[in-house]
Image: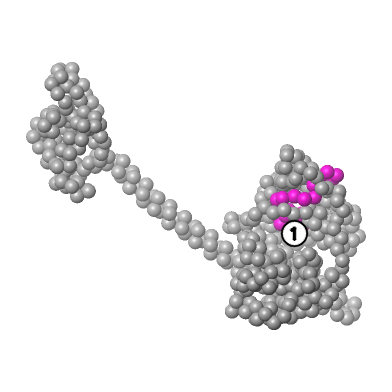
Amino acid sequence: MTDIARALLDAAPVCCCLFGENLNIADCNDGAVCFLGCSDKDAVLEGFNNFSPPHQPNGQKSETLFREYLAEALKTDKIRFEWLFRRADGMPMPAEITLVRLTLSDGFAVAAYARDMRECKAALEEMRVVEKELKRAVAAAEQNAAAKTEFLANMSHEIRTPMNGVLGMLSLLQSTPLDRRQENYVLKAENAAKELMRLLTDVLDYAKMDSGIFNMDAAEFALEEVIDELRAVYAPKAAAKKLSFEIELEKGVPLKLRGYPIPLNQALFNLLYNALKFTEKGGITLSVKQEYRSGKIITLHFTVKDTGIGMAEEQVRKLFTPFLQVDNSTSRRYGGAGLGLSLTRNLVNLMRGDIWCQSVLGKGSEFHFTAQFTADASDDSGLPHTKYLSSKDRFAGCLALLVDDNEINQATAGEILSAAGFSVDTASNGKEALEMLAQKYYDAVLMDIQMPVLDGYEATAAIRKNPRYNKIPVIAMTAYAMAGDRERALELGFNEYLTKPIDPAALYAALQGGVKRN
């Protein structure tokens, strides 16, 4: 080896050993001496085979396997593999070896370059430990999320079930002969119960959003139906306070949309509720206009304007913070948990929109939000709203099967159905319902979800398997109100999914198109 070649070999910052065509070690550099922890090159050259354990981790003999790699390198020019060394001090050292065939004037040789892998192996092991811990953390988080979902579902059911009975019985009580003082008591009790139900709903909805389990799929809906529902709820309330209530729909706004009707309805409901609560004179206006449109993508701008107490600029800045009242004195006077507007902001975010407020203290407020939808290029705005026959006329002579294990719920829903003209049979579980369906024809089935013996999901699945019942509408009436419950119910064959407390108007609307007497 020339002096230049020797200098280059020793100057290499890695371990390098040279092997001849006979596969025996012929030379090494200073890097090899340091790499193997030896005193000099002679120690490396004379005892090279001693710097490996008798067997490699794969069980093969080290000396035999290394010679096989050398022979392969002479044929294939270059190979790379992992190797376990044992240094002069006895410490094991994992390494990566690269064998390269060299062409010399008097034949061939193989250069072996070795790289210490101890730090790399330690880092990989640390990464494995971290990965294992992350997997444990993810599993724990998923388990926790599942527990939260189950807890919220149970809480929703346990809260809504008795509230359904309370509101239902108060509604029925109002239809009985009462003197003026009794009517006043019942009305106040009903208003208090509705406020409690609204508060409980806000708390549950906030908990669902905070847990990341409030989600839903996009659906097609009619904007006019959303507006009609809001008008039906708030026009009488405004009239009772001697307030004007107007809804302005800009010409050209499409009525058939695809998006998230439930968040839209809830957001408008919350804003109108606040407007009504904080307005003593004047009126409330809901307006809808087109903000932006590109092809089928449309952004609508909703505004709820009132002539109420208004807010100062500092109060407006705090509006959308959860649990924070803009003014403690306002809270004491008007009530509320400070969740409504925070929930509304989250609902607007679900619809890919923004929300903001403009207000003048003592003069009123304007709440604005945008929401994104898709709509067909052919605009159907301006079509007249659908008109329906009265519920009593529509359902006279029809027979309904009401399936619920709660006697109060049976009585409440039964009275609502009877008021619409239905004759009603009751069953306490899905098994009883199937037995009764086998005996007579029903125009509609109202099905609770959680019941003993056979629950609503199982019973409805069985109903849909029988061609005889194929045209009978089955409507879920449940205290469960978690994300995905509605979708699951519709997939299993329910025609509609209503949450308790049951709104008679919503129930009649659900039955309107499905009940057809044979």
Query: In this rendering, would 43 be left or right of 114?
Result: left
Query: Can residue 312 be seen from the camera position used here?
Result: no
Name the residue rendered at 72%, 46% in the picture: 374
The local crowd at label 1, few if under 14, some if 14 to 19, many if 20 or more residues have their Cα within 10 Å, is some
Query: In this rendering, would 339 be left or right of 389?
Result: left
Which residue is labeled 1 in the image? 331
Query: Can residue 224 be seen from the camera position used here?
Result: yes
> Looking at the picture, does residue 292 appear above or below residue 350?
above
Query: In this rendering, would 178 be left or right of 478?
Result: right
Query: Which quadrant: the C terminus?
Result: bottom right
User: Which residue is at the front of the view, 280 or 38?
Assistant: 38
The span shown in magenta is 250-269
Name the residue rendered at 29%, 41% in the picture: 119
The quadrant holding residue 397 is: bottom right
Colour convention: one colour
Query: Which quadrant: the N terminus?
Result: top left
Residue 441 lies in the magenta-colored region: no
Name the residue rendered at 73%, 61% in the picture: 336
Q: Position of residue 476 (x, y in %)?
A: 69, 69
Q: Position of residue 186 (x, y in %)?
A: 82, 75
